[in-house]
Image: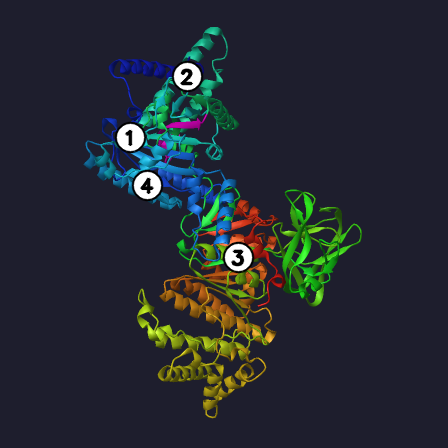
């Protein structure tokens, strides 16, 4: 008995055994409730214990400490040291980490998608089942929570309450400095923690209200207690049908690391870690160290006397004495000269399991982690009841075990590891956390600025590059793109390590380039592509074309013979496609290359939004790839081209402003007829600036802006005075006629009218019609793929204006509007559309709009003058694999650490980084392919019924 214990621990053990024997004579504990060591839990979360001790608990949330840059880690560590020094010796505090298995069925209810008795309930149910399947891939319902409990001594509740509230405010402020969210817990919330710990075997839900105490005559302990406790074993116990054991960490390592605590918390088992901290009075700590130094000096003198008597050199003394003396002196110097305090630390670990054998296995696994860092885990002997009580977030520690540590040494147990993103309500699914394998569920509306970006994978091939098809044939990219549909290609399954059939879609020209990489294989085959395209190499990693070297093995069966760069006399088109779920495809020469990627992520979010929210959805689709999804959701596809019969009127205004002006007075902002006309005048000025082909960055002159404003006012005053109905809505021809009216006396009116003629009576008059499509449909997609060069810029600007009008209308209805604009970099190339985009990114959030820009041409995007405003007003970014050159720019603009950057460097399909406010998390998103929802999102336009 007591083997392996120190002399102090054996002494303490004898004291406890004597105390236990005395208590047994005095009073016999009859109930499980008597074992729970508190007197009263008040509604506000204050708990009264023995000897007039009172405690409160704050729950705090994780921050990305493990992924942070080194300078950020240092800042967090220093702030945490300040946090520890905040407490004086009258405040004992306890930091608790709970990893608990919960009832999976109850947990799964948080991601349930309610059925709505409509034609989409089948896919709503399937999507919900997919979410539950992804939930099971995580920690199987293992919920991780963190708390800090602080305890003081006070004469009465009133005195305790005032002081606890002051301490609570200080702690919350410290967490704010650290960048961690925190919230105080009330009585019911604290009782639920105890209930869930005591009832791990049943996982029954906690049902309690304070009015139930008076109604039932029961105490709060009756609602949380297990069926019983059994502490007869010297090194384990039982509560209900759960076996448990409490151990303490024996710190024997000369150096501590911040990774040890993280490794304990990464265990996929029920685990409760508690760090009890008792600050010491500075004078007491210094006095204690001086006493230790005196004792060491005494021992040193005794050893020197012994050396003289034995006839050897008195300077030769045991190294332990010398080492301890130096350490104690250094410690004393730190306390006297630096901002260091001394703390009594008790590090406890509670392991639980459903059987004794599994408990021993889990405890052995825990001990292995400690040994990895040269420390030991020791079971508490005859102290399991005290250890169990000290493992509750109660602020009570009666184990009598502690270790002295300074502020810096205590702070090495920094309580932050990896942040999770799992929200309830209208949270959307974005994959699994690549570090913890837990689901990422977030609601962008909760962000200060919900605007977002989806940055896809770059890289493309020349049109003559042949792609291998699953039927053994091959086709060039140029031919595949001309098919205007998908293609049965060959992919490489990284998991099964084999080639497999897949569908390539969204086959298109991605951009025009005047510089190419030419990769020559050992058999003489040559591949021409952009220098950033990713090739799958023999080690299972992707590498960019420019980084390939002679001898590099390419999957599955080739080697690189030579790589060179070619500058072309004129830009040529390059192509790419999207292949889900494998994210790659095989060229006819046999090698496997990465696909482009971004649209699938957007489609998944669009589908998710449609299924669980009432938000309206608008898509600007320059490649004609969203039609299958929109049609499946019974949405409205507006095909805009010179030959189309779908019309949208750029002169449309929201007539509801006229009939119900009271709905448009929101939070001090007023949208009335005057502001509506002013906005329309501003838009038409942008439209005219674009069609007049002004020199780069040149604007309309004062006369031109003035006549446009004058004409627009004339048109809408006449329209509103006569009969403001949709069928009488002004069109561009009315604007042209008004310009011609002033043309004889006004040179500016004549110039504008001459340029406008093409779009009214000329061949490009597609926008000179009243709207004839259902713009009130919940899902609207503007397909601008077939807009010619002349119309494309104007068309994109008009689409943006239509979106703005919809957002304005929905604002009055208190409805959010999601706007997805693909190939976003194209909008930022032209000053007019770029400026309009910046206005959208700045103003939409105030009007309930949530814009999302998608691009895989990140270089073009980053090169835009508008990028600072766009990125600065986007709190949500979904980033897939990126070109190495772009990575450096993105890292600088978004403050990405090298470790975080590795998740978008040669990453596989569906892997990357998600930015949610200040949180950056690596994700992995492998969407199940055997689902109806996947088929909807990956359907080829040519497979859908004709519109």
Quarter of the picture containing the C terminus is: bottom right
> Residue beneath label 3, please?
602
Residue 119 tag number: none
First-in-chain label (4 vs 1): 4
Left or right of 203? Residue 752 is: right
Badge 4, how many Cα within 10 Å: few under 14, some, many 20+?
many
Alpha carbon distance from label 2 to label 3: 61 Å
Which of the pair 106/604 is nearer the observer? 106
Which of the pair 659/836 is nearer the observer? 659
First-in-chain label (1 vs 3): 1
Placement of 796 over or under 523, stated as above or below: below
- The structure residue drawn at horizontal position 46% and vertical position 90%, both measured from the top left corner, is 741
Placement of 325 over or under 302, stated as above or below: below
First-in-chain label (2 vs 4): 2
First-in-chain label (2 vs 3): 2
Residue 599 placed where, x, y %? Answer: 56, 58
First-in-chain label (4 vs 3): 4
Residue segment shown in magenta:
333-354
Residue 304 placed where, x, y %? Answer: 44, 13
> Residue beneath label 1, please?
222
Alpha carbon distance from label 1 to label 3: 50 Å
First-in-chain label (1 vs 2): 2
Q: Say what secondary structure mark 2 lies in.
A: loop
Residue 197 placed where, x, y %? Answer: 37, 31
The answer to whether residue 587 is visible is: yes
Quarter of the picture containing the N terminus is: top left
Q: In the figure, residue 507 lies in which quadrant?
A: bottom right
- Asked if the magenta segment contains residue 346, the reply would be yes
Which of the pair 187/645 is nearer the observer? 645
> Residue beneath label 4, please?
171
Q: Say what secondary structure mark 1 lies in.
A: helix
């Amino acid at each position: 008995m007591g083997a392996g214990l120190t002399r102090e621990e054996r002494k303490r053990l004898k004291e406890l055994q004597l105390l236990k024997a005395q208590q047994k004579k005095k009073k016999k504990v009859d109930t499980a409730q008597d074992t729970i060591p508190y007197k009263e839990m008040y509604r506000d979360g204050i708990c009264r214990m023995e000897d007039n001790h009172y405690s409160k608990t704050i729950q705090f949330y994780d921050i990305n400490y493990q992924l942070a840059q080194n300078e950020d880690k240092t800042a967090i560590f220093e702030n945490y040291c300040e946090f520890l020094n905040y407490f004086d010796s009258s405040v004992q505090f306890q930091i608790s980490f709970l990893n608990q298995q919960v009832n999976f069925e109850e947990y799964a209810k948080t991601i349930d998608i309610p059925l709505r008795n409509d034609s989409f309930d089948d896919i709503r149910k399937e999507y919900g089942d997919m979410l539950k399947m992804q939930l099971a891939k995580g920690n199987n319902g293992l919920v991780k929570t963190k708390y800090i409990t602080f305890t003081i001594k006070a004469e009465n509740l009133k005195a305790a309450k005032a002081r606890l509230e002051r301490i609570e405010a200080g702690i919350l402020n410290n967490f704010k400095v650290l960048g961690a969210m925190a919230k105080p817990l009330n009585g019911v919330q604290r009782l639920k923690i105890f209930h869930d710990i005591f009832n791990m075997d049943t996982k029954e839900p906690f049902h309690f209200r304070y009015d139930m105490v008076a109604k039932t005559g029961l105490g709060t302990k009756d609602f949380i207690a297990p069926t019983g406790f059994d502490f007869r074993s010297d090194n384990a116990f039982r509560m209900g049908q759960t076996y448990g054991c409490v151990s303490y960490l024996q710190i024997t390592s000369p150096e501590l690391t911040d990774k040890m605590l993280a490794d304990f918390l990464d265990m996929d088992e029920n685990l409760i870690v508690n760090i009890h901290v008792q600050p010491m009075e500075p004078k007491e700590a210094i006095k204690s160290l001086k006493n230790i130094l005196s004792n060491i000096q005494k021992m040193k003198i005794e050893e020197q006397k012994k050396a003289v008597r034995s006839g050897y050199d008195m300077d030769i003394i045991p190294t332990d004495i010398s080492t301890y003396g130096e350490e104690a002196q250094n410690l004393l110097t730190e306390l006297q000269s630096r901002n260091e305090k001394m703390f009594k630390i008790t590090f406890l670990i509670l392991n639980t399991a459903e059987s004794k054998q599994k408990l021993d296995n889990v405890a052995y696994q825990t001990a292995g982690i400690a040994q990895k860092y040269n420390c030991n885990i020791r079971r508490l002997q005859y102290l399991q009841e005290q250890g169990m009580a000290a493992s509750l977030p109660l602020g009570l520690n009666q184990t009598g075990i502690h270790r002295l540590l300074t502020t810096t040494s205590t702070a090495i147990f920094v309580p932050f590891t990896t942040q999770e993103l799992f929200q309830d309500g209208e949270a959307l699914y974005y994959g699994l956390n690549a570090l913890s394998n837990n689901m990422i569920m977030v609601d962008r509306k909760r962000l200060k600025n919900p605007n977002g970006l989806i940055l896809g994978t770059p890289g493309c091939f020349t049109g003559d590059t042949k792609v291998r098809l699953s039927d053994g044939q091959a086709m060039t990219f140029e031919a595949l793109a001309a098919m205007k549909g998908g293609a049965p290609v060959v992919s490489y399954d990284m998991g099964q390590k084999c080639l497999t059939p897949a569908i390539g879609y969204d086959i298109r020209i991605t951009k025009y380039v005047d510089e190419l990489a030419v990769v020559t294989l050992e058999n003489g085959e040559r591949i021409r592509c952009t220098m950033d395209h990713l090739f799958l190499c023999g080690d299972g990693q992707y590498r960019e074309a420019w980084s390939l070297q002679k001898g590099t093995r390419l999957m599955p069966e080739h080697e690189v013979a030579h790589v060179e760069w070619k500058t072309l006399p004129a830009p040529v088109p390059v192509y790419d496609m999207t292949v889900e779920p494998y994210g790659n495809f095989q060229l006819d020469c046999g090698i496997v290359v990465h696909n482009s990627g971004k649209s699938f992520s957007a489609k998944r979010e669009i589908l998710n939004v449609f299924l669980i929210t009432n938000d309206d959805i608008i898509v600007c689709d320059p490649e004609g790839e969203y039609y299958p999804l929109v049609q499946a959701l019974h949405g409205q596809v507006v095909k805009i081209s010179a030959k189309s019969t779908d019309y949208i009127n750029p002169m449309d205004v929201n007539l509801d402003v006229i009939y119900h002006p009271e709905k448009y007075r929101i939070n001090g902002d007023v949208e009335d007829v005057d502001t509506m006309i002013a906005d329309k005048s501003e838009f038409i000025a942008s439209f005219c600036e674009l069609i007049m082909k002004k020199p780069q960055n040149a604007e309309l002159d004062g006369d031109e802006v003035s006549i446009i404003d004058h004409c627009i006012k004339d048109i809408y005053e006449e329209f509103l005075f006569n009969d403001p109905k949709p069928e009488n809505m002004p069109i561009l021809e009315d604007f042209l006629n008004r310009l011609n009216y002033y043309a004889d006396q006004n040179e500016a009116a004549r110039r504008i009218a001459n340029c406008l003629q093409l779009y009214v009576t000329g061949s490009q008059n597609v926008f000179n019609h009243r709207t004839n499509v259902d713009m009130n449909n919940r899902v609207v997609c503007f397909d601008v793929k077939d807009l010619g060069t002349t119309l494309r810029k104007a068309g994109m600007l008009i689409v943006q204006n239509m979106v703005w009008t919809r957002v304005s209308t929905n604002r009055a209805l208190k409805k959010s509007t999601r706007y997805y604009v693909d190939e976003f970099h194209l909008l930022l190339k032209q000053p007019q559309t770029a400026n309009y985009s910046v206005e959208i990114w700045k103003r939409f959030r105030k009007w309930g709009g949530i814009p999302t820009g998608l691009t895989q041409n990140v270089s073009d995007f980053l090169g835009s003058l508008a990028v600072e405003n766009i990125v600065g007003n986007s709190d949500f970014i979904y980033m897939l694999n990126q070109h190495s050159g772009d990575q450096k720019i993105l890292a600088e603009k978004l403050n990405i650490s090298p470790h975080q950057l590795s998740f978008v460097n040669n990453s596989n399909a569906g892997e990357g980084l998600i930015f949610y406010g200040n949180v950056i998390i690596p994700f992995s998103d492998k969407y199940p392919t055997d689902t109806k929802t996947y088929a909807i999102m990956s359907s080829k336009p040519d497979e859908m019924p004709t519109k």
